[in-house]
């Protein structure tokens, strides 16, 4: 088996020693090439090249951003039987997709799990979310666990601006509070159209999930759409109001271990095949915590069995 290990040396939990252990362990089972990323988009380019070169497996060692880039590189030409398998060794602060797959958070444990999966031939097909391009000639953007329009994308933009700092959960929470307290928070208003459903206007933010939990605050899982999974359609969670009582209510529900998200100001659907989000003015869009720009419309669809994951 030919494999390419894509490592982000700047990821929160990635170390040179850990990379060497991972590389040595993988090299005992596969013919291995190693790529260390040093610029945004490098992991995507490396994964795309690995596919061109006929690799059987591409292993992403880094955070959610690294995994997202590798996935987008593998699917640059869309899903097909020729796309290499994906392996993940978590190295970030949240590692949402890896945790959704049931992988250990510790990189050494995850390495052992990956090796056993390679030897045993354990693999699974997973569904992903796809954001359609907004201009001719551009490629779609794939996401593994979530996309967002509005407030959370504004948070991602501000965290991205502070790239000199580690993108820890504490930093995200601090930025989220700052963005919320801005006078223009929650603007503009959004409209969501789901096939077979009546269009809903006047929404202040929209989260789209490919799996549940949607994200994590440290060890605490955040649930928005408990009926969403990697083998189903997308989950949609949208709020008509960002008034403080509404936000607190749904935050409590989201971090509850048993609670269900519900309320008069909430629009929520599970297992959605596709949706369209529009805004009269450009609004920021993020996928897997990566800002992809500002748009007046976003079309998102669920693509089942899009990728094979080892493990």
Image (cartoon, helix red, strand yellow):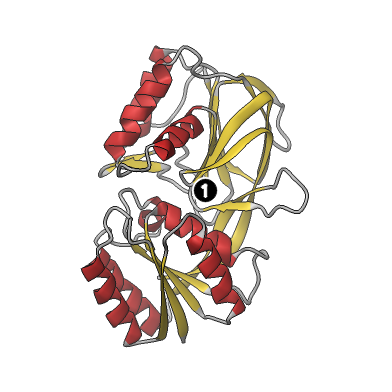
Q: Is residue 310 above or below residue 98?
A: below
- Picture layout, residue 302 above or below residue 276: below
Q: Quadrant of residue 176?
A: top left
Position of residue 209 relative to residue 77, above or below, is above
Viewer can see residue 24: yes
Find numbered disc 1 in the image and state the secondary structure of the residue it sits on: loop
| Above or below: residue 265 compared with residue 284 | above
Residue 258 appears anywhere in the view: no
User: Which residue occupies 53% across, 62% down?
Assistant: 44
Q: Identify the residue shown where x is 58% and y is 53%.
A: 142
The residue labelled by disc 1 is 210
Specify the quadrant of the image occupied by residue 77.
bottom right
- Residue 191 position in % (x across, y down): 67, 25
Extreme left residue here? 17
Give whichever of 295, 254 is nearer the camera.
295
Q: How many marks?
A: 1
Q: Residue furthest right?
A: 136
Q: Position of residue 64 (x, y in %)?
A: 41, 53
Percent coordinates x, y for residue 267 in the rendering: 56, 26
Position of 69 with respect to 109 (left or right) is right
Q: Position of residue 158 (x, y in %)?
A: 43, 32
| Towards the viewer: 134 or 88 | 134
Question: Dividing the image into 4 quarters, which one contains the C terminus?
Answer: bottom left
Q: Is residue 109 found left or right of 90 in the rendered image?
A: left
Tell me what residue is drawn at x 43 percent, y 58 percent.
Answer: 66
Q: Quadrant of residue 119?
A: bottom left
Query: Residue at position x 72%, y 43% from top?
Result: 134
> In front here: 10 or 218?
10
> Pointer 1: residues within 10 angstroms few (<14), some, or many (20+)?
many
């Amino acid at each position: 088996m030919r494999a390419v290990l894509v490592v982000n040396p700047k990821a929160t939990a990635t170390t040179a020693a850990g990379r060497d252990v991972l590389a040595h362990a993988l090299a005992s089972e596969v013919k291995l090439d190693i790529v260390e990323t040093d610029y945004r988009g490098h992991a995507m380019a490396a994964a795309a090249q690995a596919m061109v070169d006929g690799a059987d497996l591409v292993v992403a060692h880094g955070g959610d951003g690294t995994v997202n880039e590798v996935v987008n590189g593998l699917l640059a030409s869309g899903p097909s039987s020729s796309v290499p398998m994906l392996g993940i060794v978590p190295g970030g602060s949240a590692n949402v997709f890896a945790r959704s797959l049931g992988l250990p958070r510790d990189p050494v444990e995850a390495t052992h799990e990956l090796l056993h999966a390679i030897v045993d031939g354990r693999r699974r097909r997973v569904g992903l979310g796809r954001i359609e391009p907004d201009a001719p000639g551009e490629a779609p953007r794939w996401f593994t666990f979530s996309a967002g329009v509005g407030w959370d994308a504004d948070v991602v933009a501000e965290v991205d601006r502070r790239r000199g700092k580690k993108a820890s959960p504490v930093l995200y929470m601090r930025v989220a509070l700052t963005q919320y307290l801005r006078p223009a928070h929650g603007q503009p208003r959004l409209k969501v159209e789901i096939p077979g459903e009546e269009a809903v206007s006047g929404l202040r933010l929209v989260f789209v999930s490919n799996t549940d939990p949607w994200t994590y605050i440290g060890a605490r899982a955040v649930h928005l759409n408990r009926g969403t999974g990697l083998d189903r359609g997308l989950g949609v969670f949208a709020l008509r109001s960002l008034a403080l009582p509404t936000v607190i209510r749904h935050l409590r529900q989201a971090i509850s271990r048993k609670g269900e998200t519900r309320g008069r100001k909430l629009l929520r659907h599970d297992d959605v095949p596709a949706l369209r989000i529009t805004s009269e003015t450009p609004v920021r869009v993020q996928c897997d915590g990566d800002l992809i720009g500002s748009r007046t419309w976003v079309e998102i669809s669920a693509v089942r069995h899009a990728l094979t994951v080892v493990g």
